[in-house]
Amino acid sequence: MGIFGFFNKNKKETLDKGLEKTKTSVFDKLARAIAGKSKVDDDVLDNLEEVLITSDVGVDTTLKIIKRIEERVARDKYVNTQELNRILREEIAALLTENNTMDSEEFTVPEGKKPYVIMVVGVNGVGKTTTIGKLAYQFKKKGLKVYLGAADTFRAAAVEQLDIWGERVGVPVIKQKMGADPASVAFDTLSSAVANNADVVIIDTAGRLHNKIGLMNELTKIKNVMQKVVADAPHEVLLVLDGSTGQNAFEQAKQFTKATEVTAMAITKLDGTAKGGVVIGISDQFKIPVKYIGLGEGIDHLQVFRRKEFVDSLSGETDK
């Protein structure tokens, strides 16, 4: 089943195309590494380990995957190399499940939270504002009333970019002048959203990492001020990471998870990179679900992350 129902053919094609380079990096390399071998032995597993590490899955996660495959090989006594692809897919999917990554049905927000408040964090240049614009587009398409808050007041470009997305999607953007207090912008945005009966509020925040204490204080202040308007805001803290930076994305995830409580991740720019393995590693290391993946420039190229489809596209499998 898999690609039917909610996951249509166009989305499957976008996913396949977006993960093409990573697929070449992981599964095609693996095919070459095991060519001519009939059973999975230590040599094959060493090759697999190297393939996963060079595809930015990360050392710890790679060792975890190898250990699980070793256990299966020991249990099943004889595993041929043909089966290795399937086993690898199953183990990666299982790993993603353990990291609280549950497949959600499209772009939805929980009932009973109105407005549903998403605070978006991440360094500059990872595609944060673009992700916010694309999210707004998807929510609006679902008939939800969306408000955007330009609380990255340190870069004029960030406010302008959000403004452009607001116009493009047709949703209001609440902003103040350059250098204004980000918490004040968040307060205005939520007040306006509540007054106008909005369903979703997405707050953009400054992406500065050079001062962890400053970042922590700023994000805490934004949260506290938002709670004066909506008691349990933010309902989601979404960390945006650039998948094409590979190990760098790990480092950013480490910094942001120390600075604030991140509840979900969006991993962007997967279409131009062979480092898509980073999705598996980051999700495993931080135990934070990957909620969205960015697969291209198009407004429709942000997808809800779905484990099975992701792993199938990665390995070149299609549902029969």
Image (cartoon, rainbow, N blue to C red):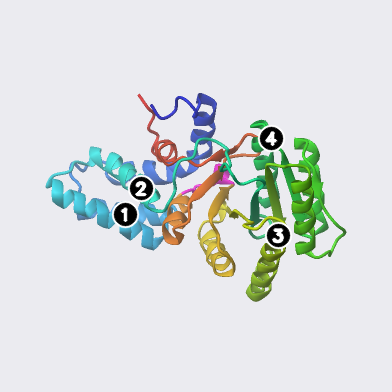
Residue 226's mark?
3
Front label number (3 vs 1)? 3
Closer to the chain start, of discs 1 and 4, is 1
Q: Which residue is mark 1?
A: 65
Mark 3 burial class by Cα count in 10 Å: few <14, some 14-19, many 20+? many
Front label number (2 vs 4)? 4
Give the structural element (helix, strand or loop) at label 3.
helix
Which residues are the magenta region? Answer: 269-276
Q: Which residue is mark 4?
A: 140
On the image, the x and y values in percent for residue 38 come to: 18, 41
Q: Amino acid at mark 2?
A: Ile
Identify the residue at horizontal 56%, vertical 68% (top origin): 255
On the image, the x and y values in percent for residue 308 come to: 40, 38
Q: Amino acid at mark 1?
A: Ile
Quote the CA–CA distance across marks 3 and 2.
38 Å
On the image, the x and y values in percent for residue 179 come to: 84, 65
Residue 139's mark?
none
Q: Judge whether residue 113 is colored magenta.
A: no
Number of marks drawn: 4
Q: Which residue is mark 2?
A: 92
Closer to the chain start, of discs 2 and 4, is 2
